[in-house]
Amino acid sequence: MDLAFSPADEEFRTEVRQWLRARVPREPLPSLETAEGFEAHRAWEAELAADRWSVVDWPARYGGRDAGLLRWLLFEEEYWAAGAPGRVGQNGIHLLAPTLFAHGTEEQRARVLPPMACGEVVWAQAWSEPEAGSDLASLRARAVRTAGGWLLSGQKTWSSRAAFADRAFGLFRSDPDTAKPHQGLTYLMFGLRAPGVTVRPIARLDGKPAFAELFLDEVFLPDEDVIGEPGQGWRIAMATAGAERGLMLRSPGRFLAAARRLEELWRERGSPVSERDRVADALIGARAYQLFTYAAASRFLDGETVGPESSLNKVFWSELDIALHETALDLLGPEGEPADTDWAQRYVFALAGPIYAGTNEIQRDIIAERLLGLPRGRR
Amino acid sequence: MRFLLDAEQRAFAVSLDALLTAADTPAVVRDWSRGDHASGRALWSRIAEAGVLALAVPETYDGGLGPRPVELAVAFVELGRHAVPGPLVETVTAAALLTRADPGVAKRLLPALASGGTMATVAPEGAFALDGDAASLRLALSPDGIRLSPGHGPVRPSLDPARRLTPLAPGGELLDAPTGQALTWARLATAAQALGVGLALLDRTVGYVRQRTQFGVPVGSFQAVKHRLADAKIALEFARPLVFGAALSLRPAEVAAAKAAACEAACTTARAALQLHGAIGYTAEYGLSLWLTKARALRTAWGDPHECRALVVSAAGDRRW
């Protein structure tokens, strides 16, 4: 058991740090939930990709560095510590890409991944529907067979980034006559500017269009945009959900950096004893998440898979994130109220954490049933 | 970087678990709580034979196997899981203290700690010491150094009946030794023990709610029950890597973080365990009480939650994350 990284890993870390020091914008980019900010973040993705820093864990032929999981974790620690911009491409990079690696064809990977890696094509998710949230398998948007492809109709909602993104991926019902709701679903990709698509942005709490509703009316997509076998979408999507909750979606580096910023803020405000425990808890929580992830990565490198234990992660970091940002706003007092500060914006973002990527209630059900072995029951 | 216990460390945990399961520890705890130390001393010898107490004693002393803080943490998780009574944390702490004392004193006292021949207790001067009536070596910590206390006052019961609190008699030989590092070992062992207590409480409660039926179904099928146990599981699984990370670094801030998180997790689990057992869990007779009360007692032993958190944000903690 040891926590020492190899000299080669440390060299990699230094290289990342030096690149970021030279390149991270001095002034924060405008919010990526605005049209202007979205394009600024897209340009930043291109800058990262030009020096092959946007997807370090991917194979080199798609724009990565074959860096492996450990170095990806180190990259993330350096990235967030440097105060670098949010990643506008992350839905594609962390959700769709793992699905393509596991279930896509080589043609799909070669066509989809390089433009994803450089921000040329930004991806949105299309899972939830007005009547299918936590009960995702009850979704009703249809994919109907047509010559050379499929026609999509129906409504998707809470589609993050869709207000400005280029393409989307998600689940559609391709066979309406199955015994169980999670059968007959197909995982596919489609263009958000294709004929028949209407995107209606939804303003989140602070009024920014962070997500959107999608109305689909016989939107055509070719067969090559189906991932895996038609009808097998649920199984494929659950693999993606594991990745989303698991190691990739919110790396420990984010929370370590945020906790250190919180500690700085606490010192700037005169180190009030009344908030000391909460500041320490943020630091302790971030460290716990880092070490938990190192252990998970060590198991992964031993050949084990990431299973239901990824639900532990999701609940932990999302609640840590809220507690950390609530503490920051309390430290700021009345100065924490203006909505245009970094702390306020990050707080609004943190509030969504326990809801997206499978609500924390669903995660607790998974923990209880699949890790603790409690009997299934009514939700 | 490989942050996993190796095969030997895992095997050590399994063998201790087997030893403690076979020892009928709950009966030992009840004897100990009454002041009947015979079965506890027998178990103590077996734990010492397994090498646990030698892990804090440097190899350079007779019988020493250490210092091996990771293995020590592995062992204390098991000791906590089985609610083993006695001044285990204190004996290990005494070993860490004496390691830094005058070599003559260390050579005189350490081998008997490693072998299990001597049970030790340690407390800051004026505070209660654990199991001073069972220990033959009683160390009182003061700003001047360590005093070998000549005796102990009357036993006062703890919230955890298996923890017998005793004031230490004043006076006795004064050893010149630094006491700072001792706190680190005491906190690490307590954190690991608390983690084990929490794991045992979770296991027992999961078992109970699976078989306890109400409204025609196991109560463990209800979401309100599941979610409380899920929260306990999360707290424990994120405390675990802090405990082993602390064992690797032995930095005060890291050990304090592990202590705060493990004790918090144990207390969260204890509250869930009591609530989900219902009235049966509230009885002295039912075995759950062995762990319930210990979770509370360990929370303030060797650094309460505020002290530990303060160290995380202080320069003295030497935090490196």
Image: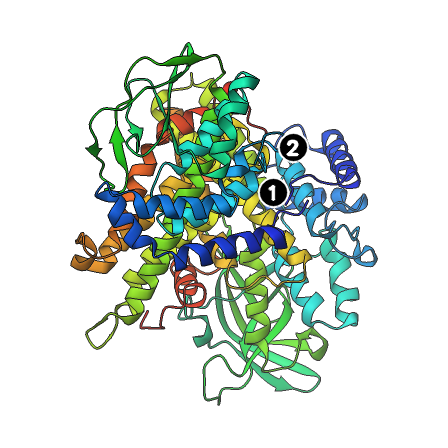
Question: Which is in the foreground here, disc 1 or disc 2?
Answer: 2
Q: CA distance from mark 1 to mark 2?
A: 12 Å
Residue B248 placement, left or right of B134: right
Helix, strand or loop at label 2? It is loop
Residue A213 screen position, x and y as percent: 49, 62
- Exactly how many numbered labels are in the figure? 2
| Residue toward you, B25 or B190 | B25
Q: Residue furthest right?
A: A61
Chain of the residue where label 1 is placed in the rendered structure? A
Quadrant in which the C terminus of chain A appears: bottom left
Determine the residue located farthest toward the top in the rendered image. Answer: B144
Marks 1 and 2 on same chain: yes
Indicate the position of residue A160 as horizontal and vertical percent values: 53, 56
Residue found at x 55% / y 72%: A171
Task: State the residue at coordinates (81%, 43%).
Answer: A51
Is residue A62 shown above or below B316?
A: below
Q: Position of residue A227 (x, y in %)?
A: 66, 74
Query: In the figure, B205 relative to A333: above or below?
Result: below
What label sits on residue B175 in the rendered view? none
Q: Residue at left 48%, top 70%?
A: A155
User: Residue B256, how many percent across, how many down?
Assistant: 45, 31
Task: Give the residue number, with chain letter if any, for mark 2.
Answer: A82
- In the image, what residue type sits under mark 1? Gly
Pick the residue in front: B251 or A278: B251
Give the vertical position of A288 relative to B91 (above or below): below
The answer to whether residue A99 is visible is yes
Question: What colour-coding does the image apply?
Answer: rainbow
Q: Which residue is mark 1?
A: A86
- Residue at image location 65% in from the left, 42% down from the top: A2
